[in-house]
Amino acid sequence: MHNRWQQTTRILVMENVLITLIVLVVLQHFSPIKWSWGLVLSLCCGLIGLAIIEGVITWHQQYNRQKTIDRMEAKLRQMSSQQFPPHILLPQSDPLYSLAQAVNQLESFQKHQTRRAELQEKELMMIMRYLPVGVMVIDHRRQVQLSNPTMSELLQVSVNSVAHIYTKDIQLYALTKLIEDTITSGDNQRATITLTPAPNTQVVEASTVYIQGNRGQFQIVLILYDITEVYMIEQMQDDFVSNASHELKTPITAIAGFTETLLGGAKDDPETLDQFLHIIADESQRLIDLIQDVLSLSRIRAQNTTKLTLSSVAVRPLITQELAVVQQATDRQHLTINNQVDPDLTVTSDAQKLNQIVKNLLTNAIKYNRPQGSVTIATHVGEQSWSLIIKDTGIGISADDQQRIFERFYRASPSRSQQLVSGTGLGLAIVQELVNAMQGTIEVVSQRGVGTTMTVTLPLIAPESD
């Protein structure tokens, strides 16, 4: 501003001198002037006074104009750093009025765009936060720019929000290879990857999206979708087909083999005939039991049969009745039965379904028990629910098998797989379906060689089904 003022002062001095000379020349032409020192001094004083007055007026205008320009300059600097000071207000007569209006409009537009961008960023972060899939954005320097909480849960690490190399979070070879293949080829990739092995299996479908930017820069979006449940269902389906085929093949093969032997001449021996017919009858009954259990599962799962027929049920008489049914099997293994059920316990439930639950659990407790072992039946009553507890001293179930014993046809113990204990492998699957239909829960606590405790928890008053 100092340099501009000096330049303006020089122009004003030159302007006043020229005007004075022109006036003197004109006056000299029309009326000769008698010069004297007094006249010259008066002219000089007048000239100086005029220059001072004009200079003050010009300085004041220049100062106000420069002050406005400085305000605009400061405002533009603040706008560049995402700060938005108040608008600059000038009268319409001001030479800088149009420029001030343009700066104000630019500020309003930038403020609107900034708020819009902030809103979009918040919406994006909110969506990312609650996405059921893991998302991670990796730039061309292999640094993580963005990651959502689901990704942290899947990787079981806390992903830092500050940019960092992605290998600090992802150390599984299959995932790093997928990312590096995407960087090398520039193509999207997809693979099914096991993050955690058994028994806590976790499987994801990993996808990478390659996004090409400017000047050789790019971004990679890594997406992890948890398909553990789908994977486990597929495994269960494969096991179901395999186990069902095995369960059907064994009795059918036995029936066909002994029938062929009888037709081959063994029928002529009365003792052999009687023995083989008993075996054929047992295997036929085994097939009948298997088919009945499969039909029971289908009926339970059918919506029209999951309706509950509620009535008041005395629990101890029901347990006593089922114990009488399995008395022969109990005596055969010399088991001790401890019936600790409260004689006065009465619940509102579906008697038929409850009877099936007790029957299957008692059958398992006796079947997989050791000779001269024991079975304890007890109940526990809470404020809104009651529990049926059946504990045995049998062969037990390993920790790995406990997660799968409710699958159809699954056999947990070696004795089951070797068919030393007969059964269809559907008893616990039926129990779980019945318990779910009655809006209850079932828990298992077991140890190999020690025994198993099954706890079924049901509402004291079962809710009406639709």
Image (spheres, rainbow, N blue to C red):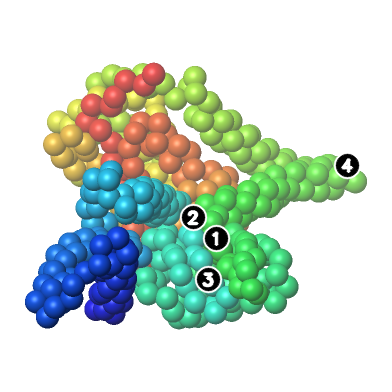
Query: Residue drawn at (54%, 72%), measured in percent from left and top?
Result: 139
Residue 380 is left or right of residue 403, and the answer is left
Secondary element at image label 3? strand
Cα separation between marks 1 and 2: 7 Å
For the residues bearing labels 1 and 4, Cβ distance under 8 angstroms:
no
Q: Which of marks 3 and 1 is nearer the N terminus?
A: 3
Which mark is on residue 138? 3
Residue 362 point in image, percent of width and height: 38, 44
Q: Which of marks 3 and 2 is nearer the N terminus?
A: 2
Residue 208 is left or right of residue 271, and the answer is left
Crowd tier of the residue under label 4, counting other residues whose Cα lies within 10 Å: few below 14, some 14–19, many 20 or above: few
Which residue lies under the disc numbered 1? 223
Camera sees residue 453: no
Relative to the observer, which residue lies in front, 83 or 318? Answer: 83
Residue 413 point in image, percent of width and height: 51, 62
Residue 187 point in image, percent of width and height: 71, 66
Cα separation between marks 2 and 4: 64 Å
Cα separation between marks 3 and 2: 16 Å
Which residue lies under the disc numbered 4? 263
Cα separation between marks 3 and 1: 11 Å
Q: Which of marks 4 and 3 is nearer the N terminus?
A: 3
| Mark 1 or 4, closer to the camera | 1
Relative to the observer, which residue lies in front, 114 or 2? Answer: 2
Crowd tier of the residue under label 1, counting other residues whose Cα lies within 10 Å: few below 14, some 14–19, many 20 or above: some
Which residue lies under the disc numbered 2? 133
Residue 405 point in image, percent of width and height: 48, 53
> What amino acid does circle 3 point to?
Ile
Task: Name the image quarter holding the N terminus.
Answer: bottom left
> What amino acid does circle 2 point to?
Val
Query: Residue drawn at (38%, 37%), measured in percent from left and top?
Result: 435
Q: Which of marks 1 and 4 is nearer the N terminus?
A: 1
Crowd tier of the residue under label 3, counting other residues whose Cα lies within 10 Å: few below 14, some 14–19, many 20 or above: many
